[in-house]
Image (cartoon, helix red, strand yellow):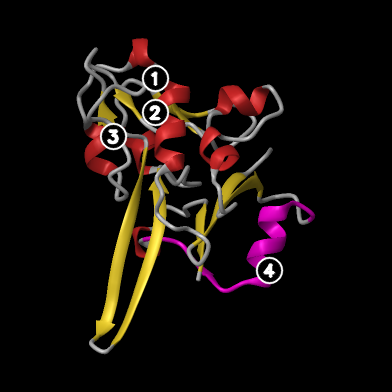
Amino acid sequence: MKKYGMVIDTIKCVGCSACVVACKTENEVPEGLHRDWVVEEVSGKFPNLFMEIRTERCNHCSDAPCVSACPTGASHQKEGSNIVKVTPNKCTGCKACVASCPYNARFIMPEGYASKCTFCDHRIDEGKGPACASVCPTEAITFGDLNNPLSKVSRLLRARKHKALIPEAGTNPNIFYLT
């Protein structure tokens, strides 16, 4: 099974939002909704401040609470991978998945079903990467198979200090941030 993941270099990310625009365009996300977004986080105490810029999205968790919370099976992991998907015609719009996601990565489409980042799995099926990674001008977003020790994502994680968001949630997220 492929275990897809994304590595985001917080040193390279400049917060330009090219990834957000590419995602909205590629996936026809309605105005006012988003599958990914840019966060600017400032920490420290003046004059020793540190600012981290990062792009966030669904973490395609290995232990995805949105999948187990879904009463209809609309939220599921794509066969052969860890990509978390939603089958719109099975979704009742109950929002159990929205409530269970610690990353605030889900939203309800105007048609009444839940939606989220899919790592552009339709592009992966064509041998391409996610739209967000393909347009990043600083190449801050890297996508690949975490189970392949030779993949660029695996090599980056071995070479650099990194973190995942909200590890205490126990979701085993597959988005990592190089620090």
Give the distance between the C-alpha atoms of the residues marked 4 and 1, in whole angstroms: 35 Å
In the rendered image of this protein, does residue 15 appear above or below residue 135?
A: below
| Marks 1 & 2, CB-CB < 8 Å contact | yes
Q: Which residue is mark 3?
A: 97
Q: Is residue 172 left or right of residue 125?
A: left
Q: Secondary structure at mark 1?
A: loop
Residue 146: x and y in percent read 66, 51
Q: In the image, what residue type sits under mark 1?
A: Glu
Crowd band around label 3 with a 10 angstrom C-alpha radius: few (<14), some (14–19), many (20+): many
Q: Earlier in the sequence, mark 2 or mark 4?
A: 2
Give the distance between the C-alpha atoms of the residues marked 3 and 4, in whole angstroms: 32 Å
Find the magenta span and give its range: 150-165
Crowd band around label 2 with a 10 angstrom C-alpha radius: few (<14), some (14–19), many (20+): some
Taking the spot 66% from the left edge, 54% from the top edge, the residue there is 153
| Marks 3 & 2, CB-CB < 8 Å contact | no
Q: Which residue is mark 1?
A: 28
Q: In the image, what residue type sits under mark 4?
A: Arg
Q: Is residue 83 left or right of residue 50?
A: right
- In depth, the one of 131 and 4 nearer the eye is 131
Crowd band around label 4 with a 10 angstrom C-alpha radius: few (<14), some (14–19), many (20+): few
Occupied quadrant, residue 41: bottom left
Q: Can you see residue 117?
A: no
